Image (cartoon, rainbow, N blue to C red):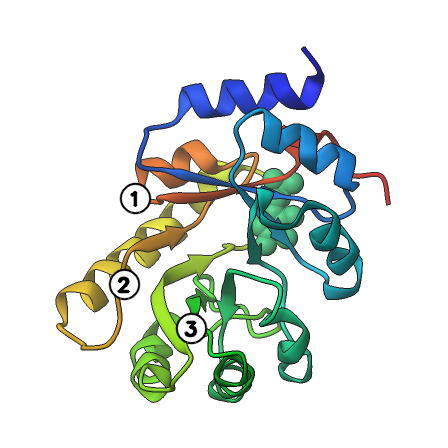
Amino acid sequence: MGKIEAAVKSILKEIPDNVEVVAAAKTRTAEEILEAIEAGIRIVGENYIQESLPIIEKIGDKAIWHFIGHLQKNKAKYVVPHYDMVETVDSIPLAEQISKYAIKLDKVMPVLIEINSAREPQKYGVFPEKAIDLITGIKDLPGLKIMGLMTMGPAVNDPALLRPYFAETKSLFDTIKNSGIDGIEMKYLSMGMSDSYLIAIEEGSNVIRIGTKIFGHRAY
Ligand SMILES: *Cc1c(COP(=O)(O)O)cnc(C)c1O
């Protein structure tokens, strides 16, 4: 068994059935990604449009494609035709651009709202206390459907330090879910990466984004 196959199988065995794995595939080749798919990965996450489009062309509908990087609003037109979900919506102008191009393609793009759970000014994502305003501001845009939240959390040396950020994002997720806002479906809570996914799952994540632990260390 290859390393990628072994890694995928051990992760899938370790996590509860309700948790989806997104293979975070930045810098990886189509061959590596296909190996992960053959081992049981269904969802692939990409961060960069230019790098991902030829890979999506090769692999196509053997995977479900999530955009997990920061999306500039002028790039929405390249993402909408090729991806099945955008996990990183954090502004009204970006949502409007996704909506605009989705309408043209007669498509409804599922999106997650990216939460800046550590409230770091230089980072992407909406602050937790601004999330409901953003959701109510974009939920009625045609061609777009809000399906949950995503968070990265701050860069820390000890993944245990991420727990409070995951817990706060889960609590926000539940508040929104129980608020009865119509037109949205709070189904996915995307949090946790290679070194933090078990903690994230304990705190309520049902989508984990794993790169290094599947593919090995990235060589830039
Ligand atoms: C790269 C990346 C991941 C995966 O990170 P690893 O530590 O390699 O598992 C998850 N989410 C996002 C948004 C990423 O860019």
Q: Are marks 3 and 2 in contact (CB under 8 Å)?
A: no
Q: Position of residue 40 (x, y in %)?
A: 52, 28
Q: CA distance from mark 2 to mark 1?
A: 11 Å
Question: Dividing the picture into quarters, in which one does residue 134 lie?
Answer: bottom left
Secondary structure beneath disc 2?
helix
Q: Position of residue 139 (x, y in %)?
A: 32, 81
The residue that disc 3 covers is: 108
Residue found at x 13% / y 73%: 180
Q: Residues within 10 Å of mark 1 (few under 14, many from 20)?
A: many
Quarter of the picture containing the N terminus is: top right
Mark 3 or mark 2: whose residue is earlier in sequence: 3
Report the front residue among 65 and 197: 65
Mark 2 or mark 1: whose residue is earlier in sequence: 2
Q: Is residue 2 left or right of residue 7?
A: right
The amino acid marked with disc number 3 is: Val
Q: Residues within 10 Å of mark 2 (few under 14, many from 20)?
A: some
Q: Is residue 197 left or right of residue 7?
A: left
Q: Position of residue 211 (x, y in %)?
A: 64, 39
Q: Nearer the viewer, mark 3 or mark 1?
A: 3
Residue found at x 25% / y 57%: 171
Quarter of the picture containing the C terminus is: top right
